[in-house]
Image (spheres, coloured by chain):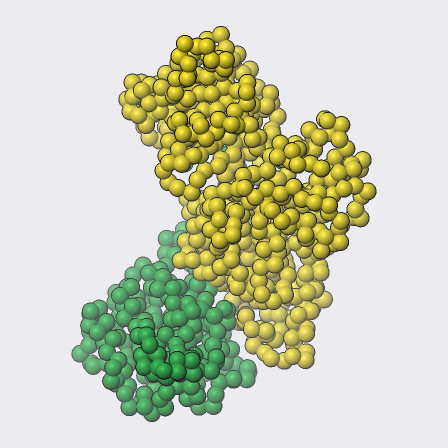
Chain colours: A yellow, B green
């Protein structure tokens, strides 16, 4: 089984609730779900979809075509009609075009009067989405008990009356769909014993950050990053101080101040906000103060497509900042890797006293993955503030072999600590000594970069040994590339893949194999290809790039594979 | 009381000889000594400019960050370690111009920090362009026909935005400035002290021109009277009223509710949160029949 369900409608019609409820029904029944969303940057109206992909084993990648299209309104039905497979099922409120039943595909349409059923059975039109969820469950073989249970727990806090209205409306939708489907009503999905962790990558960041000792976040709301600071603010038990800054410049400078005073600190933004933060990133490099920055990408330039996805900021993240200083860029591909890399980001930032950018995107922010489990690393590295008792007099930038100086927070153990954005002496004071201090300071920063490079994990390789074509990707496209490789292999092609989760400093790489290398990226210019050609001299033949704001899926890759 | 010498720094001073900044430095050292603050208990935060070099010239913790960004950095420092006396010391261009937005929101946040604005009404380090406080009509090395916009009135703005301690000092009066700074630092919440600091290199008037025009705020001025304080703050046509313009009952300082939860120590002293809390958060993400979803 590999079913893909599109729940479509206008913003404000409750498609996210339908998608979430139905996804949880599948999960309750023991089936892993991958749910992605695409929506317009508006509060009401427009066309939005939630896409639910369900299979026996986790398939955490999007699929562009739909087996079932649920359209809450006629505009959405038209907008998404092309996605519906010829053997797919359309669920809408519109009666079939030919009421006499002679249409060839009439069998594949059911018509559910969402609002009238909601009014009759739930008491109010707002329960139309419960009617739709009920119809959808009937159409895909989910037992009504699952829906009853999920709705009951989802609305428990709003009281029995709301729960009852939702369940009654859902029941009406379920029964109407079942009766319309008649003999075509699917068999009930057999219940499986499996359970899954179901989360977006961004949902795991606050948890992992808190576990890694984060105590401070300041951020300015910007899609698709806003959920991160929101989760910290909502969950006081995580122990993280969360402040909405007046702008992204304030956000990063507050976080750097907190970090200099000894608190593990982070911020989160998207491309435009990251642009405002850049002077702060350069400052972090200069004053050697740890900071973790989540850069959740969306398509640019400028405001671009605020609610869509992209991988357009790889080179930006690597190059952002005036002057030369070390930094780390990490790009997770799923919630578990996001946990691991978030913990690692705080550790690398602390150990090397550098800014670390965690590159995500709208796809990772808003898609929920099913995984067998989600877990924190067994060992989470401790903070590395120095022991103040080790110093009689303390100099913040004491030179040493590694370039990393012992770090104290302001006032720690009775010492004074001096940080300066100007070029500075080992004591941290402003200097214009160009003959000895400046060259030593440059070398100190570069030595950290050299050592960091040896820390960076090489990319993961999959089936490259016999491959004559290797697809190279980074970050969120991993699932789609893996699926494309599977399908190409099934067609007899000898294809493999390489995935980069840690991108900067570019790790030391094995020599290239005798194969054609193509990158697969959510951008138009092949940024990873550029990086590999220029950074390690790799020969990369071309790029399968996507820049329309939608996530890359396997079909997109297959249609463009050389 | 700590000794003045304890606050001395070995760093070579880069200010012009005779710069009134030396008066601010002297007053700040005396203030710290008289408040019995040891160097490690103080964090001086600055941006960029001649004034922003002050933190190097006395012994303290120093965060000499980016131009205009002293305020957010100071807020972060204060949240992370409220045991430190966090004092921002920077110029009018840095605080009122490049970083004006941050100051505006800092008044609203009310962190327990002191902001000392060295107000020389000119951009000195970049050699004589208008600052946000240069009076209309004054000629500069960029505004050749005279400044064509009105000066910022940051003290009035501070009072208007709920800042509970607003004062004006004069760099040429070290005794008076010390008194003001002591009160400002002792005040719980954000305190703003604008210090008239004539620029002897690029300014349009010598120090004595200011000295003749500095007048004490009248004894009968009630600093709790906000409306009156705004009027005094704006009354800089012919003279400069110096002293505490506005002192209001303390408001709840920034991050108070967080501090109620975690205590008042430096955040680096807190242990990691209990592993069971984060493990439980991850466990919640597993969908089970009985699981409930929180929104």
The quadrant in which the C terminus of chain A is found is top right
Q: Residue at x 25, y 82 (%)?
A: B237
Q: Residue at x 67, y 62 (%)?
A: A448
The total of numbered circles placed on residues is 0
Q: Position of residue B176 (x, y in %)?
A: 32, 83
Q: Is residue A364 visible?
A: yes
Q: Position of residue A129 (x, y in %)?
A: 38, 26
Judging depth in this view, the residue of B61 and B206 nearest the camera is B206
* Above or below A138: residue A538: below
Q: Is residue A477 left or right of residue B277?
A: right
Q: Residue furthest top?
A: A183
The quadrant in which the N terminus of chain A is found is top right
Judging depth in this view, the residue of A439 and B74 nearest the camera is A439
* Above or below B110: residue B143: below
Q: Residue at x 51, y 27 (%)?
A: A82
* Above or below B46: residue A33: above
Q: Residue at x 46, y 57 (%)?
A: A248
Q: Position of residue A409 (x, y in %)?
A: 54, 64
Q: Position of residue A24 (x, y in %)?
A: 48, 26
* Above or below B185: residue B269: above
Q: Is residue B293 visible?
A: no
């Amino acid at each position: 089984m590999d079913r893909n369900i599109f729940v479509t409608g206008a913003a404000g019609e409750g498609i996210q609730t339908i998608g979430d409820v139905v996804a949880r029904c599948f999960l309750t029944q023991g089936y892993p779900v991958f749910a992605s969303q695409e929506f317009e940057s508006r509060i009401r109206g427009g066309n939005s979809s939630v896409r639910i992909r369900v299979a026996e084993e986790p398939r955490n990648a999007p699929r562009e075509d739909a087996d079932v299209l649920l359209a809450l309104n006629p505009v959405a039905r038209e907008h998404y009609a092309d996605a519906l497979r010829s053997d797919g099922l359309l669920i809408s409120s519109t009666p079939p075009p030919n009421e006499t039943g002679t249409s060839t595909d009439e069998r594949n349409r059911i018509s559910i009067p969402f609002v009238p059923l909601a009014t009759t059975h739930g008491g109010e039109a707002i329960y139309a989405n419960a009617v739709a969820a009920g119809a959808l469950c009937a159409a895909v073989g989910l037992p009504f008990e699952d829906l009853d249970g999920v709705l009951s727990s989802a609305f428990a806090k709003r009281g029995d009356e709301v729960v009852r209205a939702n369940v009654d409306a859902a029941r009406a939708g379920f029964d109407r769909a079942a009766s319309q489907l008649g003999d075509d009503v699917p068999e009930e999905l057999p219940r499986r014993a499996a359970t899954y962790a179901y989360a977006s990558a961004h949902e795991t960041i606050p948890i992992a950050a808190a576990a890694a000792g984060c105590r401070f976040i300041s951020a300015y709301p910007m899609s698709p990053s806003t959920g991160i600071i929101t989760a910290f603010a909502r969950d006081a038990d995580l122990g993280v101080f969360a402040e909405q800054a007046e702008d992204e410049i304030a956000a990063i400078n507050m976080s750097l101040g907190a970090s200099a005073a000894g608190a593990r600190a982070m911020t989160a933004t998207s491309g435009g906000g990251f642009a405002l933060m850049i002077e702060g990133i350069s400052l972090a490099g200069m004053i050697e103060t740890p900071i973790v920055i989540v850069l959740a990408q969306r398509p640019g330039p400028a405001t671009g497509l605020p609610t869509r996805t992209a991988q357009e900021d790889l080179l930006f993240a690597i190059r952002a900042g005036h002057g030369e200083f070390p930094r780390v860029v990490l790009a997770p591909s799923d919630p578990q890797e996001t946990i691991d890399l978030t913990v690692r980001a705080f550790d690398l930032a602390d150990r090397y006293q550098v800014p670390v950018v965690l590159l995500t995107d709208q796809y990772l922010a808003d898609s929920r993955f099913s995984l067998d489990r989600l877990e924190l690393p067994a060992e989470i590295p401790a903070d590395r503030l120095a022991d103040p008792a080790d110093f009689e007099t303390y100099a913040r930038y004491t030179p040493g072999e590694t370039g990393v100086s012992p770090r104290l927070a302001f006032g720690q153990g009775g010492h004074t600590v001096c940080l300066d954005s100007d070029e500075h002496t080992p004591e941290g004071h402003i200097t214009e000594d160009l003959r000895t201090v400046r060259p030593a300071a440059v070398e100190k920063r570069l030595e950290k970069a050299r050592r960091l490079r040896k820390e960076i994990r090489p990319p993961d390789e999959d089936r490259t040994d016999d491959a004559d074509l290797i697809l190279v990707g980074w970050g969120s496209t991993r699932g789609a590339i893996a699926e494309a490789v599977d399908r190409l292999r099934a067609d007899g092609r000898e294809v493999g893949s390489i995935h980069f989760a840690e991108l900067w400093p570019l790790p030391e790489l094995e020599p290239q194999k005798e194969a054609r290398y193509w990158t697969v990226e959510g951008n138009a210019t092949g940024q990873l290809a550029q990086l590999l050609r220029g950074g390690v001299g790799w020969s990369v033949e071309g790029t399968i790039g996507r820049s329309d704001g939608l996530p890359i899926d396997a079909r997109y890759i297959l249609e463009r594979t050389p | 009381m700590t000794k003045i010498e304890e606050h001395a720094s070995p760093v070579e001073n880069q200010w012009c000889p005779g710069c009134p900044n030396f008066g601010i430095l002297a007053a700040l050292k005396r203030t710290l000594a008289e408040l019995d603050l040891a160097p490690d208990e103080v964090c001086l935060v600055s941006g960029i400019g001649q004034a922003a070099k002050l933190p190097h010239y006395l012994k303290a913790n120093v965060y000499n960050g980016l131009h205009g960004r002293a305020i957010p950095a100071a807020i972060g420092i204060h949240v992370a370690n409220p045991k430190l006396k966090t004092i921002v010391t920077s110029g009018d261009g840095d605080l009122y111009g490049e970083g004006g937005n941050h100051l505006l929101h800092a008044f609203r946040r009310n962190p327990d920090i002191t902001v000392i604005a060295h107000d020389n009404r000119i951009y000195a380090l970049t050699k004589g362009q208008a600052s946000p406080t240069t009076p209309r009509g004054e000629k500069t090395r960029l505004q050749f026909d005279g400044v064509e916009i009105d000066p910022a009135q940051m003290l009035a703005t501070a009072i208007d935005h709920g800042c509970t301690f607003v004062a004006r000092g004069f760099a040429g009066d070290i005794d008076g400035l010390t008194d003001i700074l002591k009160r400002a630092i002792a005040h719980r919440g954000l305190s703003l002290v604008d210090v008239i600091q004539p620029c002897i290199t690029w300014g349009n008037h010598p120090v004595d021109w200011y000295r003749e025009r500095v007048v004490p705020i009248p004894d009968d001025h009630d600093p709790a009277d906000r409306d009156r304080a705004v009027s005094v703050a704006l009354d800089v046509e012919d003279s400069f009223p110096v002293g505490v313009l506005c002192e209001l009952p303390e408001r709840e300082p920034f991050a108070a509710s967080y501090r109620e939860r975690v205590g008042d120590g430096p955040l680096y002293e807190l242990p990691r949160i209990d592993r069971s809390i984060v493990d439980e958060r991850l466990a919640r993400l597993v969908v089970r029949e009985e699981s409930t979803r929180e929104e």
